Image (spheres, helix red, strand yellow):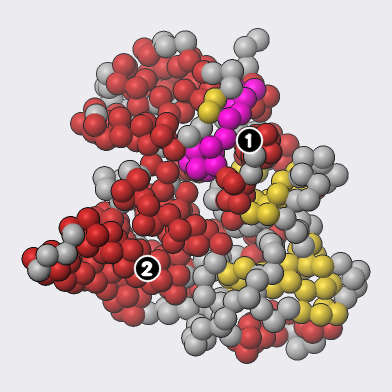
């Protein structure tokens, strides 16, 4: 994990807050703070202030408080915020506007830990002579994220620049605490995000987040991918040089974060967007692993045009690639065979009970529509329209959702698919999506 070095002022705390009481109190403070601002806002309207101005001020203040608390808590709470940041494209503009900048900040950073605490972690993990491993070591973090921060250094053995990822002290305990508390975040965010189903999102994150604490496991995933993509003209995965449960050292990548691509010209933006899609689908085929954290902070556009992929903590192992029934059923849905789709899902134990086949096909539209066109234009308006349609048909959608059975591996595939679509929509990418499915999704290609 790497990126351009930036100034980051340390904050005055040594550890991630870990106690259930302490972290729960911070989360409970979010709805209380929102209620307090609402009361003040009502008072301001009663004495003549413009209602729209007051409401916008309240949203700005709420955004600042929510993401400040999430960032300071790090751990699962921070992961929740990062996941949410991918889906802001579905929110109405009057809701999304005040939050967009705060959400983007969550994709890239969190308050860093002091150098004294960082050195203690390095000594514990790499030994008392850890400094001898590096000919220099940047004191300021280049990136600070949910459970760790990254420093740029020089690997003494080879002289090459490296990224040193260091886990926050207490991050593992904080994660466990968050798993007990994270359900509250759904209710905290509900009044701020319209009708988005936050309960489903928080449940999925709580289920998977434990997998990201062990950096030895992350090193294993990253090494598998680095070997599979070694020398590739389109993708690069950093090589792992050293790893312990709490420290990971890998080769440094310089590049622009994927979320910066939105301001590029159409041809460059579309080319990067296509590479992003190609990687998400090709990794299971080429490496037998699915990178299951598709938010833009994990992707860098290098100067030579290649796409660099970092942060391999959350991975699904797929030694046989993506499941064949997935491609076959999407192809069937493209032909509008609603009953055949329903029968196919039942045969794979992905659908239980009776459901109207037409309703099912309508529910699957966001997955199917981009595959229908020769070249599909992913936009915020399109994604928002899909979301609003499902919300307007909530009774039907709820009925379908209750009958769908999603095994763990499909849950991560679903997260990547939906997260990828959200990122493409944020970036306004036009791409030949169906070509990627033909190449990398078993069962989709026409024989």
Quadrant in the picture for residue 327: top right
Q: Which residues are magenta?
A: 421-435
Q: Residue furthest right?
A: 158
Q: Which residue is mark 1?
A: 266
- Residue that appears at 80% across and 65% down: 241
| Dot 2: element | helix
Q: Name the residue nearer the viewer: 320 or 336.
A: 336
- Position of 17 compared to 437: left or right? left
Residue closer to the observer: 121 or 87: 87
Residue 308 shows in this picture: yes
Image quarter hosting the N terminus = bottom right
Q: State yes or no: residue 396 in magenta.
A: no
Element on which disc 1 rests? helix
Question: Measured from the top left, where is residue 429 in percent x and y?
Answer: 57, 35
Q: Quick check: 153 left or right of 423?
A: right
Q: Position of residue 142 (x, y in %)?
A: 66, 70
Task: Name the residue nearer the viewer: 150 or 225.
Answer: 150
Horizontal placement of 157 versus 176: left or right? Answer: right
Q: Which residue is mark 2?
A: 64
**Which SS does the magenta portion mostly show?**
helix
Label 1 Cα crowd, 10 Å radius (few <14 / some 14-19 / many 20+): some
- As drawn, 112 above or below 263: below
The x and y percentages for residue 37 are 21, 69
**Residue 325 visible here:** no
Name the residue rendered at 24%, 60% in the picture: 53
Quadrant in which residue 364 is drawn: top left
In the displayed structure, would residue 224 be above or below residue 182?
above
**x 38%, y 72%: residue:** 69
Q: Residue furthest left?
A: 46
Please provide percent x and percent y for residue 161. 82, 67
Q: CA distance from mark 2 to mark 1?
A: 32 Å
Quadrant of the snapshot with the C terminus? top right
């Amino acid at each position: 994990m790497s990126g351009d070095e930036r100034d980051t002022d340390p904050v005055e705390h040594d550890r991630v807050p870990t106690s259930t009481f302490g972290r729960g109190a911070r989360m409970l403070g979010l709805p209380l703070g929102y209620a307090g601002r609402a009361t003040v806002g009502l008072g301001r309207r009663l004495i003549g202030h413009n209602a729209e101005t007051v409401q916008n001020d309240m949203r700005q203040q709420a955004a600042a408080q929510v993401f400040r608390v999430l960032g300071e808590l790090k751990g699962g709470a921070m992961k929740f915020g990062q996941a949410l940041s991918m889906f802001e494209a579905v929110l109405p503009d009057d809701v999304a506007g005040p939050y967009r900048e705060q959400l983007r900040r969550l994709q890239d950073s969190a308050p860093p830990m002091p150098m004294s605490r960082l050195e203690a972690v390095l000594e514990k993990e790499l030994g008392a002579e850890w400094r001898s491993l590096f000919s220099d070591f940047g004191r300021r973090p280049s990136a600070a994220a949910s459970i760790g921060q990254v420093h740029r250094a020089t690997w003494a053995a080879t002289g090459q620049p490296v990224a040193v990822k260091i886990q926050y002290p207490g991050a593992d305990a904080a994660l466990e605490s968050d798993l007990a508390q994270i359900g509250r975040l759904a209710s905290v965010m509900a009044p701020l995000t319209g009708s988005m189903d936050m309960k489903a999102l928080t449940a999925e994150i709580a289920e998977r987040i434990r997998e990201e604490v062990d950096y030895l496991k992350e090193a294993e995933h990253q090494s598998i991918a680095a070997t599979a993509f070694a020398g590739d003209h389109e993708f690069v995965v950093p090589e792992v040089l050293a790893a312990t449960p709490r420290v990971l050292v890998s080769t440094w990548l310089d590049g622009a974060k994927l979320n910066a691509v939105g301001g590029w010209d159409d041809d460059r933006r579309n080319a990067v967007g296509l590479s992003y899609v190609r990687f998400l689908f090709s990794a299971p085929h080429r490496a037998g692993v699915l990178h299951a954290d598709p938010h833009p902070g994990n992707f860098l556009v290098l100067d030579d045009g290649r796409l660099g992929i970092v942060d391999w903590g959350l991975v699904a192992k797929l030694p046989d690639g993506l499941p064949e029934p997935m491609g076959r059923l999407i192809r069937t849905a493209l032909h509008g065979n609603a009953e055949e789709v329903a029968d196919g899902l039942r045969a794979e134990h992905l659908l239980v009970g009776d459901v109207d086949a037409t309703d099912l096909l309508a529910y699957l539209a966001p997955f199917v529509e981009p595959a229908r066109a020769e070249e599909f234009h992913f936009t915020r308006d399109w994604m928002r329209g899909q979301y609003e349609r499902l919300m307007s048909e909530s009774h039907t959608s709820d009925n379908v959702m209750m009958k769908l059975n999603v095994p763990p591996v499909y849950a991560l595939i679903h997260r990547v698919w939906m997260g990828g679509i959200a990122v493409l929509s944020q970036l306004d990418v036009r791409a030949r999506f169906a070509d990627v499915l033909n190449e990398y999704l078993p069962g989709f290609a026409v024989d």
